[in-house]
């Protein structure tokens, strides 16, 4: 019988008084957990996502930075959107990666993919992808294949920051880092 145990500890950052050099933030609970933790993530909200009308907040833009990792390379960083009631926005991740890998072109505020005009502005492009899931799946496959080849602005160096596993030979594979 295999037994797997996980312990999640959530802390908030406190500010030390009188710190002139270095980071004034410290986590509560002492320093022992810093040493014994296998993975430490710094999660911060970088902005709010407003509704189309702009009257209410519908989500958050989040930046996650790996501070310590015994299971993969540390100091990586990822940015994504969390939509309230939905979770992490897969469409937003696909659109961001497609733009970075030059699968989706952005000219001014217009997004386009091949002959398809996705929309003027990010919200309209996301709405178009939400209404056309087959096109979204096609864009995702193109992004995965370009990532496997190391093509685009990010190239192979950005491979580990995708929100989904990369397709290789038609099969989804996950690196040992991701297990």
Image (cartoon, rainbow, N blue to C red):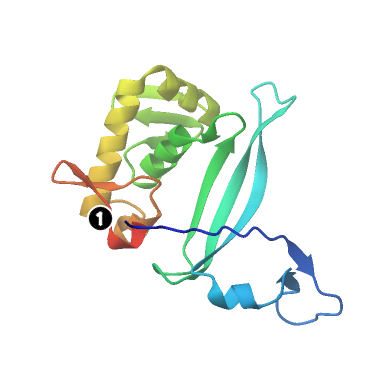
Residue 73 higher or lower than 140, as above or below: below
Indicate the quadrant containing the C terminus: top left, top right, bottom left or bottom right.
bottom left
Residue 107 visible, this angle: no
Q: Which residue extends farthest left? A: 169
Residue 175 horizontal/vertical position (percent): 28, 58
- Residue at horizontal 25 percent and vertical 55 percent from the top: 150
**Left or right of 164 on screen, residue 22:** right
Q: Which residue extends farthest right? A: 18
- Residue at horizontal 60 percent and vertical 74 percent from the top: 34
Residue 47 higher or lower than 12, as above or below: above
Residue 128 horizontal/vertical position (percent): 44, 20
Residue 99 horizontal/vertical position (percent): 40, 41
Residue 122 horizontal/vertical position (percent): 52, 31
Residue named by callout 1: 150
Residue 60 visible, this angle: yes
- Residue at horizontal 35 percent and vertical 45 percent from the top: 164
Residue 167 higher or lower than 68, as above or below: above
**Left or right of 71 on screen, residue 13:** right
Q: Residues within 10 Å of mark 1 (few under 14, many from 20)?
A: some
- Residue at horizontal 31 percent and vertical 47 percent from the top: 165
Residue in the foreground of this view, choosing between 164 and 32: 32
């Amino acid at each position: 019988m295999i037994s797997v145990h996980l312990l999640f500890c959530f802390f908030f950052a406190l500010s030390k008084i009188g710190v002139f050099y270095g980071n004034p933030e410290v986590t509560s609970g002492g320093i022992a957990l810093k040493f014994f933790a296998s993975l430490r993530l710094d999660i911060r909200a970088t902005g709010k996502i407003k509704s189309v009308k702009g009257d209410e907040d519908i989500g958050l833009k989040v930046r996650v930075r790996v501070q310590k990792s015994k299971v993969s390379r540390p100091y990586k960083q990822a940015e994504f959107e969390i939509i309230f009631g939905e979770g992490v926005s897969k469409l937003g991740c696909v659109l961001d990666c497609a733009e970075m890998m030059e699968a989706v072109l952005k000219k001014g505020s217009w997004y386009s993919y091949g002959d398809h005009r996705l929309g003027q502005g990010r919200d309209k492009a996301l709405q178009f992808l939400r209404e056309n899931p087959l096109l979204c799946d096609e864009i995702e496959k193109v992004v995965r294949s370009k990532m496997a080849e190391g093509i685009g602005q990010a190239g192979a160096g950005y491979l580990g920051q995708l929100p989904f596993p990369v397709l290789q030979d038609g099969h989804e594979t996950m690196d040992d880092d991701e297990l």
